[in-house]
Amino acid sequence: MATIKTSFARTRQRLMTKTGQSEETVDVEYHYEKEKVFSSEERMVRLQKNAKKMIDLYKDLSKAMSELSSDACDLYEESDPLYRPASRIKEMSSDMEKNRQVYEENMTTSFQQPILAYISQYKEIRKRTEECTTRRIDMDRYKNDIGKLREKSSSHVLKQKLAPTEEKYQFCKEGYESLHMELLEDLPRLYEDRNAYFTYLLAALVKGQNQFYESMANEWHNMPQMVAGINDQAGKDHPQVITSVGTSSASINIRNDPAFKANASIKTKQTSEFQTTAGPLAKDLKSNTPNDTSNLGTVVQPNPAFQHTGKQGSGAQLATALYDFAGMDSTELSFKAGDRIIIHKKDGEWMEGELHGMRGLVPANYVQL
């Protein structure tokens, strides 16, 4: 491991090289071959990772298929005609997991393990290029030191330093040139070998996928015949069976009733907000069907509190609607963003407003006076 002093000297040499204060040994061919290999390494790593993703995705697919088939089978009684295809899907999910395990084993031994071993060569060559760079920096800095010492060779002390420095330079130079020549041979060799080696991996990938898909196709082969008489496109047109939104009791916003507000003076009315044939909340609503609203019993009547002459009172103000608002019943005024509303009375969270001759309650936080 390099000492702190050596690390500092190397950093200083890099800085001096960048600022043009020291010469740098450059080999264009070496850098070209090195970049080609590094690019090939990135591609190999991506191939390995994506192949691993496929193995993991099939594992997730098998799990999802197992859960889906179990739920589908539970929907039907044994006497139902669709119980057989549903239970067959459940059986196939188990077979799918077995086929997936075979696929994973094959891909691990014929693809994953070999490519990881092959990538280790790239990791090793990268370490060697880093060592070569370190040796080059040391060689250049000792060469630079020798030049400075020779310029000041009149000093006896400097002359004593010159010989050891030249010896270090020679060691670094020989070490650099030896590794440099080795890399000039190994880098092109590794780069050219990539296609020949990946031929085996490509064959393993294709055969592994084909084997898995064929096994699954054989499992599913007879399934379409079991549901041949069913229109698989009819689901998008299947009608809803619950009470529609427009006629559901849930659409009545009972929490806007004065009983739920701290200051309820504005919304206190002489006429009930909801007049029904069986009480204020129409308990018999639950007997309604989605397409039958004849016994809904809800009679929304105009509220006398909001009947007016159409004239703006002396105490009225104009407000601008900030957002769209759809009233839940006849007591609430509907409006669009930008509408100019006449405000007759302000009190708490609701105000009495008028728009286009219609009068009703306006939420205070929806308008700006």
Image (cartoon, grey):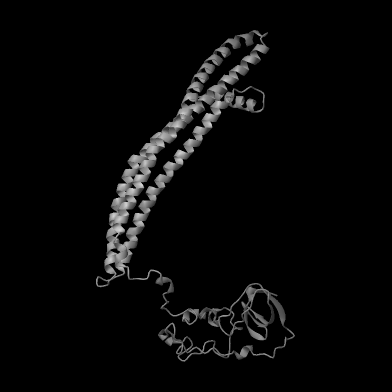
Image label count: 0
Q: Position of residue 199 (x, y in %)?
A: 39, 38
Picture layout, residue 339 above or below residue 202: below
Image quarter hosting the C terminus? bottom right
Q: Position of residue 81 (x, y in %)?
A: 27, 71
| One can see residue 56 in this view | yes
- What residue is drawn where x is 52% and y is 19%? 177
Q: Residue furthest left?
A: 79
Q: Position of 108 compared to 130: left or right?
A: left
| One can see residue 123 in this view | no
Picture layout, residue 227 above or below residue 211: below
Foreground residue among 230 and 302 = 230
- What residue is drawn where x is 31% and y is 44%? 105
Residue 231 appears in which quarter of the rendering? bottom left
- What residue is drawn where x is 45% and y is 30%? 190
Q: Residue furthest right?
A: 314
Foreground residue among 173 and 200 = 200
Q: Position of residue 71 (x, y in %)?
A: 33, 65
Residue 263 appears in which quarter of the rendering? bottom right
Picture layout, residue 125 above or below residue 311: above
Q: Position of 112 compared to 13: left or right?
A: left
Q: Position of residue 191 (x, y in %)?
A: 47, 32
Foreground residue among 99 and 145 = 99
